Amino acid sequence: MTKRILGLAAASMLTIGTAQAQISDDVVKIGVLSDMSGLYSDLAGQGSVIAAQMAVKDFGGTVAGKPIQIVSADHLNKADVGSAIARQWIDQDKVDAIVDVPTSSVALAVQDITKERGKVFLISGAGSSDLTNKACSPTGVHWTYDTYALAQGTGGALVAQGGNSWFFITADYAFGHSLENDATAVIKSFGGKVLGSANVPLNTADFSSYLLQAQTSKAKIIGLANAGGDTINSIKQAAEFGITSGGQSLAGLLVFISDVHSLGLKVAQGLVLTESFYWDQTDETRAWAKRFSAEAKKVPTMVQAGVYGAVTHYLKAIDAAKTDDGKTVVARMKETPINDFMTKNGKIREDGRVIRDMYLFQVKAPGESKGEYDYYKQLAVIPGDVAARPLSASECPLVKKG
Amino acid sequence: MFGIPIQALFGQLLLGLINGAFYAMLSLGLAVIFGLLGIANFTHGALYMMGAFCAWFLLNLFGIGYWPSLILAPIIVGLFGILLERVFLRWIRNIDHLYGLMLTLGLAQIIEGVFRDQYGSSGKPYAIPAELTGGYNLGFMFLPTYRAWVIVLSMIVCFGTWFLIERTKLGAYLRAATENPVLVQAFGINVPRLVTLTYGFGVALAALAGVMAAPIYQVSPLMGTNILIVVIAVVVIGGMGSILGSIITGFSLGLIEGLTKVFWPEASSTVIFVIMAIVLLVKPSGLFGRAS
């Protein structure tokens, strides 16, 4: 008897649940999966967690009447560690969306897992353009930047200035290879050529050997297809070995403001780089960055700003769709244009790529900088459709070709 | 040769030797500590990092430049090492090596975590001292003056340490104290103090390497972990506790790694461990180690 009453009560609660909003487990759980301790932890890491928390707080802490919860973990830049966490989050801890994931090799693994289980994946930290090409997913959104955009921006600008022969120093994993391939395509399309490359293991301290190889190649441009601590050490040691005074130029294909801050303007000045966000662009970006800095004690990178935007857009879609079902929410996200402090009139394409303007910046000389973190001057805007691989060239199965 | 101009190869060998200089200095400190105290000191990487940070603090907080830091930082970090020895390590000296490994590894994680929390992972810039900027054009390569200095200084330090331990009376006491501490104590020598000072000296060597590394790499909380694993492999290849072995192995593995960076860059982070595996198979006590 008691069992039947309990059963009835449970059944009635279930129906009440469905009558309101379909939020699984009565909570929207967002997992920030990032590099919390390694070479990418300054450009993403704890700052990404803070950005996600800010987004939740600004949204009011609840969505469709249910609380929003943030969890976070360190994937150590290892695909196996990242996969294990993602599986545990989704299968046992009922996480609805995974956010950030710098390190493309980890992001590609997480993309597979979220795709298989129909959970949302909001990519901010990873760069490989494969994430919306061969490896695209109906529930994956590539928010902040990708290697195609970097290649178009920095690569295109330098080739246009006459840098038509290149040597690559490439981080030997998914992101580095993707960046080198995308940049090579741009260089070749402008009639330039690539003279050679060295695939360097991730997390290398001494780049002098590779810089010397690049020097011997006589290439006009030495392209750094790496990121974070690796980029910092390559740029610093290139200065030591007199690369630029020898007539060769250095192209950091992915340079974050945290890298410039760490190098100091004296070493970093003159670098041309592509980003989707700089704190000192508009009143809105300044206001947001100020709030971020108050908590994080440093200015936000584009990855961290992207996490805020992506989480906000995700929550809005849940609110509108009244469900946290992955496919439904992402479909709703794709229908809605993106407008926030960082992104104006952005949209998510069918392959999951966010179409946004990118900006070509140059690092200021120490004399030009008026204060701490006054690092960039804007050279050009790269329109969203130029910065993204055209759908006609897409290998993503989600893209219907007419 | 193999499609690479012989001149370029010279340059690569020289760079390998410079990296080898850091391996040699760090593995030397490890070897001294292991040989005389029997502790596999996994905090060595963290202490190397502290040496670099100490130089950075001295410069940015007190305006003390590179040259005084070369002396001051090893002393300061060496004193910290002595504190570690007094508070933690002395209690585990006579038990299984595994405990020492766990304890020092744990301490390293804590030290590194504190620095990462405070200073982030990207690191802080440290400029090359004005006297050592610029470089020489050797014809086959551009050799930055600072790197030349690193090689000269590290060779002096390595030779000096070897001489001190193998050829002086103090060194003889040390070696005797490791063989038979009770007997040496009976001769009126304060063995525990000797051991503490030896540990401090090994730590100071790591800190000196850290100061020397500061202008080349970023002063970063992660710099110790990145290099420690390689250095442990160097010590294992050279023979645990062998002073001369660690010096020669340090420099030669730098050379081998340098060549790998030219011919097969992808394998450059692996080659040392392949060599370690081979050496362990053929001569388990290491190239210069004595079978115990």
Image (cartoon, coloured by chain):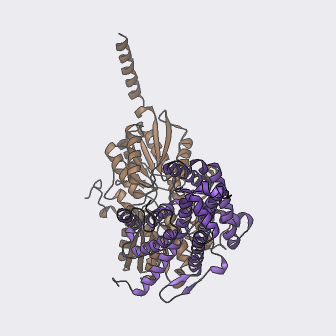
Chain colours: A brown, B purple
Can residue A379 be seen at all in this image of the molecule? no
Q: Quadrant of residue A367?
A: bottom right
Is B235 left, or right, of B5 in this rendering?
right
Q: Quadrant of residue B36?
A: bottom right
* Residue in the picture at 65% in, 51% down: B86
Query: Whole-percent x and y of residue A259?
Result: 55, 64
* Residue closest to the eye, B138 or A218: B138
* Residue closest to the eye, A347 or B209: B209
Query: Whole-percent x and y of residue A171?
Result: 42, 66
Can residue B97 be seen at all in this image of the molecule? yes
* Residue in the picture at 38% in, 16% down: A6
* Residue closest to the eye, A369 or A104: A104
* Residue in the picture at 48% in, 80% down: B14
> Compared to B70, does A174 lie above or below?
above
Query: Whole-percent x and y of residue B156?
Result: 59, 76
Task: Name the outermost residue toward the bottom.
Answer: B139
Query: Whole-percent x and y of residue A296?
Result: 61, 51
Task: Name the outermost residue toward the left.
Answer: A402
Task: Name the outermost residue toward the right.
Answer: B62
Is A172 left, or right, of A236 in this rendering?
left
Q: Disc count in the image?
A: 0
Classify the position of the C terminus of chain A by image quarter. Answer: bottom left
* Residue closest to the eye, B218 or A196: B218
Classify the position of the N terminus of chain A by image quarter. Answer: top left
> Compared to A260, does A193 lie above or below?
below
